[in-house]
Image (cartoon, rainbow, N blue to C red):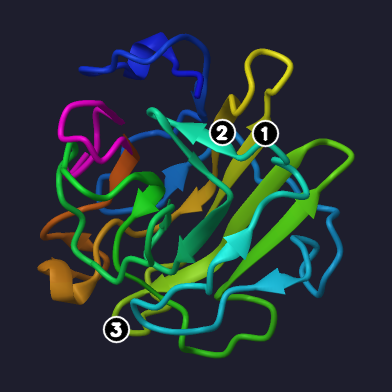
Amino acid sequence: MRIHRALRSSVTVAAAALLVSSITPLSGGAAQASCPVLGGFGGNAGYGTGIVPKSDDGSSSSIDVSSVFPNGIGYFGSTFGSIYINVNGNITFEYPLSTYTPYPFPVTGTPMIAPWFADVDTRSEYGSLNNIYYHFDTAGKRFVITWYQVDYFAQQHAPGTNTFQLILTNRDNVAVGDFDVEFRFQTINWTTGDASGGSGGFGGTPAQVGFNAGNGVDYASHPYSRTSS
């Protein structure tokens, strides 16, 4: 895995890039995103035909990633051939995660990549909106996951929704199992679910952004994670 130096915090693995689009800090209103999500992948919203079941605190089943990562995903000394997409804004490698209140990194036992770890709630029906889509771009050697106009708990569509994306790109040309991580934030209108102490989408324990190795040591966390900013 390749890690952006600016987000390195107690990280000892070798080189490269965690790419995080910049967003203006939230202050009770929508964030201005500088990096729209990628589309054109088919499906009813353009973000792929794979859809994570609608739920509160649910997850996908284990998703085989070998079509894009034939040598697996190398993550802090372990190699994984599948992932779980968790409704609450993250992916895990060893098991699904239902935790809805984000905890600070590092933490032991949960290897995770978290574009927006917070209490997402996709139960409400809004057509193609409020869904989590995924797509294997075999030509581009990318796995793309899009949280598209998602609500926060409990099924709140106000003050607005969040749209963000996680892209994992194969970099076997650098080293076997290596990959790039890219976070894209198109629209961010809330940081916190009601069960995490939030009110109107803010306050309480806000979202965690970054990644966690699961060894209690290696991690990276966006500087505004779990803050009111």
Q: How many marks?
A: 3
Return the x and y of residue 95 as percentages of the image width and height.
37, 63
Q: Which mark is residue 5?
A: none
Mark 3 — residue?
154
Mark 1 — residue?
169
Query: Marks 2/3: CA distance?
Result: 28 Å
> Viewer-proximal residue, 224 or 72?
72
Q: Residue at x 77, y 69 (%)?
A: 45
Q: Amino acid at mark 2?
A: Glu
Query: Which quarter of the figure has residue 173?
Result: top right
Compared to residue 143, the image places residue 219 above or below, namely above
Of tags 1 and 3, which is closer to the observer? Answer: 1
Q: Which mark is residue 182?
A: 2
Question: Of label 1 and label 2, which has the lower sequence position?
Answer: 1
Compared to residue 20, the image places residue 204 above or below, namely below
> Viewer-proximal residue, 27 or 152?
152
Q: Are marks 1 and 3 in contact (CB under 8 Å)?
A: no
Return the x and y of residue 76 as percentages of the image width and height.
38, 28
* Mark 1 secondary-structure assignment: strand
Graded by Cα atoms within 10 Å as few (under 14), some (14 to 19) or many (20 or more), the crowding at tag 3 reads some
Compared to residue 84, the image places residue 131 above or below, namely below
- Quadrant where the C terminus sits is top left
Q: Which residues are magenta?
A: 212-229
Q: In this orientation, does residue 162 appear? A: no
144 horizontally vs 223: left or right: right
Q: Residue at x 56, y 33 (%)?
A: 182
Q: Are marks 1 and 2 in contact (CB under 8 Å)?
A: yes
Q: Residue at x 24, y 34 (%)?
A: 224
Query: Marks 1/2: CA distance?
Result: 8 Å
Query: Which quarter of the figure has residue 75?
Result: top left
